[in-house]
Amino acid sequence: MSTETTSYLDGYRVSNNDFYEPTKTTKSKDDNAQKKITTDTDNKQIVKQEEPSHYESAIVGGGPAGLLSAIMMAQRLQSSTTTTTTTTSSSTKSIVVLYDRLPPPPPADDPIYAAESSKYYLLGLGHRGQKALNHFNVWKEVEEASVAVYGRRGWEPGQTKEEDGKITLVNKSVTSRVLPRDKLVSVLKKVIEDRYNDIIDLKYGYQVDPISFGDEGGSPVQLQVSRCIPVSSDDDEECDVESSSRTISTNFLIGADGAARTIANAMEENSIKQQQNTNILSRLFGSKKELPFKVTRYEDDNPRVYKSIPITFPQHWPSDLNYSAASVGRRITLEALPSDANGNYCALLLMKPEDELAAANCDAKELRSFFDQEFPQFSKLVNDDTMADVAKKGASSLPSFRFAGPRLHEGGRTVLLGDSIHTVKP
């Protein structure tokens, strides 16, 4: 694991049209939306706000890249509004909508991140990540939720004593900070709710599929939006889509849905159709010649899987280091990063898919025996219940090598960001 490297919807309910909307009363986020006026038994007018059908910008993917993109767009829209000589009326208000397949994660201060540390993937934020977060004025909130990591403490194969671990401090101008990915998402979501609630509309539990990518001459991007029910709590790439759906349009689409690559895959299909409908002379010599877009997928010739295991280190172990150890023959490698500043760590056991300890319901006694022999310095920190839980669960796969290109846009209204462009092993 490199330091440069999921409930119900909180605060949301299902409305009559089966799309999520805030339960609390909020200012309308799009006064362009048509208003329905009905009369109750007391003849009082009730105004019901419909879902907008058009957005200034739409973002698919509610991870760190998608949320920061939404913040960026909101700041841009705020800036363009305040520099205008005339006040922006409610009828011309611009809205950014963000769709994600999954429900939002727990709040950043939820103790679950420490109590169930092995459930949450850890991210390391180095120079580039901190610079981007600082540029958009959210670094202070992220920094408070993260832990500094100043270096690593490692044991080479055969080294099993606590004192054998060699500490190597990293000499960098920027200290890496580590936090669970879901906690980072929660921090950015909270920033949006606190600062940009009137501009950014967060929508959780949706599948979004492009219908058309529009054009630079004025035609917007058309999207089909459907309720999405994840196939499993551990799978963010597949979901069951309900038959009910609606169509929206947007002036600018950002695909930031990571390895799911809904937008990238649609771009690839669109590129293939364009190539098939264009004769060879136009492809080679036409004035609008454009390189085909594709997602390149590689087979992993050295696959690794992992099981996560929570470990709480004693007070005399520094809680600001990355811990690493390898077994003899490097059958299994252990990598651990801090989940918080209180000694709670999440360790990954990296192994080959065919390893018997990678299987679900493997023998907990064999797993304990392996730890006692290869990682005794860590084995004494893991109780029998935790060891049994680790043995029971099956191993998870690391991302496959993929990248998108050679261009990262479709026309003048769609662009890809983040892991939807490239995926590498952490």
Image (spheres, rainbow, N blue to C red):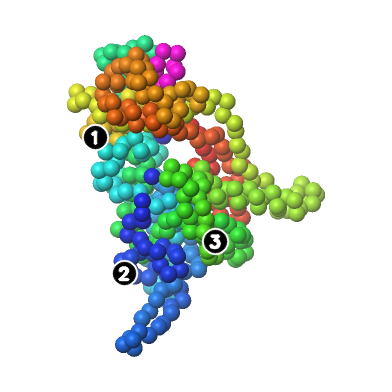
Q: Secondary structure at mark 1?
A: loop
Q: Secondary structure at mark 2?
A: loop
Q: Which residue is mark 3?
A: 243
Q: Residue at x 33, y 44 (%)?
A: 183
**Mark 2 Cα shell of 10 Å, populated few (<14), some (14-19), many (≥20):** few
Q: Residue at x 55, y 34 (%)?
A: 401
- Numbered tag placed on residue 35 in the rendering: none
**Disc 2/disc 3 C-alpha distance (Å):** 29 Å
Quadrant the C terminus occupies: top left
Q: Residue at x 54, y 24 (%)?
A: 302
Q: Earlier in the sequence, mark 2 or mark 3?
A: 2
**Disc 2/disc 1 C-alpha distance (Å):** 37 Å
Q: Which residues are magenta?
A: 325-333
Q: Amino acid at mark 2?
A: Thr
Q: Amino acid at mark 1?
A: Ala
Q: Secondary structure at mark 3?
A: strand
| Residue furthest bottom in the image | 43
The image shows residue 388 at horizontal and vertical percentages of 33, 28
Q: Is 100 placed left or right of 138 in the picture?
A: right
Residue placed most toward the observer, 148 or 48:
48
Q: Amino acid at mark 3?
A: Ser
Q: Earlier in the sequence, mark 2 or mark 1?
A: 2
Disc 2 and disc 1 in contact, CB within 8 angstroms: no
Q: Which residue is mark 1?
A: 341
**Mark 1 Cα shell of 10 Å, populated few (<14), some (14-19), many (≥20):** some
Residue placed most toward the observer, 112 or 179:
112
The image shows residue 314 at horizontal and vertical percentages of 21, 25
Residue placed most toward the observer, 149 or 385:
385
Disc nearest the viewer among 2 and 1: 2
